[in-house]
Image: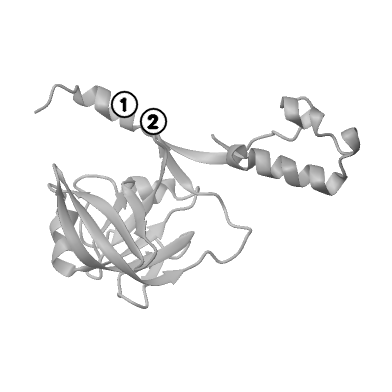
Amino acid sequence: MTGVDPAAFRAAAGQFASGIVVVSTPGGHAMTVSAFTSVSLDPPLVLFCAEKIARFHDAVLAEGAWAVSILAEDDEKTARWLALRGRPLDGQLDGVAHHPGPATGAPVLDDALAVLECRTTAVHDGGDHSIVVGQVEAVTGPAGPALPGPLVHYSGAYRRLRLAPIFAAGSHPLADWMTPGRWGVPRGLCAGILCDCFAADSYVLG
């Protein structure tokens, strides 16, 4: 044990917003995961963290193959169900539309924003979790530009992204300063500069 208060650590770590995925195995085990990230482009690697006391932990390590379904903003019910401790193992995906992934056979969610199918390449100790690294063998999606937003976890709650009204007049000092035609700046160039300036601020948590 360290001198860090567990509650304070949890609260601080919760200030880092993360997406939500479902990791599933060919045997039908599935679990909601927020500790997921890409690792490498060449070769394509990703990782997720599995709690050692979870039933899913031993299953995913034993099977060696798994799929990652990235959840959309309207998939909170699925996320909550597959995060519920003690839920029945048999038929846990019966109420969720899914199909076998072509590369691993692991169930993938029909309405996922994107899917990554992986095979385990390394497992590292991470305290009360195992860090599972996998090489991506197949990718599905996104299907098009008009997708729903992602489901996000922040400060202990599920959240959604909404477009920030940053382009409204008076909403930002630069919005008025960069009014098309002002200072002789052409409309197209002005719009491009605004997009570059505010691309990182276009969405806020809701």
Q: Quadrant of the C terminus?
A: top right
Q: Residue at x 49, y 59 (%)?
A: 113
Circle on res. 94: none
- The reply to whether residue 99 is in sight is yes
**Pointer 1 and pointer 2: residues touching (CB < 8 Å)?**
yes
Compute the Cα span from label 1 to label 2: 7 Å
Q: Quadrant of the N terminus?
A: top left
Q: In the image, what residue type sits under mark 2?
A: Gln
Q: Residue at x 39, y 35 (%)?
A: 16
Position of residue 157 relative to residue 96, above or below, is above
Q: Is residue 18 left or right of residue 52?
A: right
Which residue carries the number 1 mark? 11
Which residue carries the number 2 mark? 15
Position of residue 205 relative to residue 54, above or below, is above
Q: Is residue 195 left or right of residue 113?
A: right
* Residue 129 % position (x, y): 17, 46
Snapshot quadrant of residue 100: bottom left
Local packing at callout 2 (Cα closer than 10 Å; few below 14, some 14-19, many 20+) is few
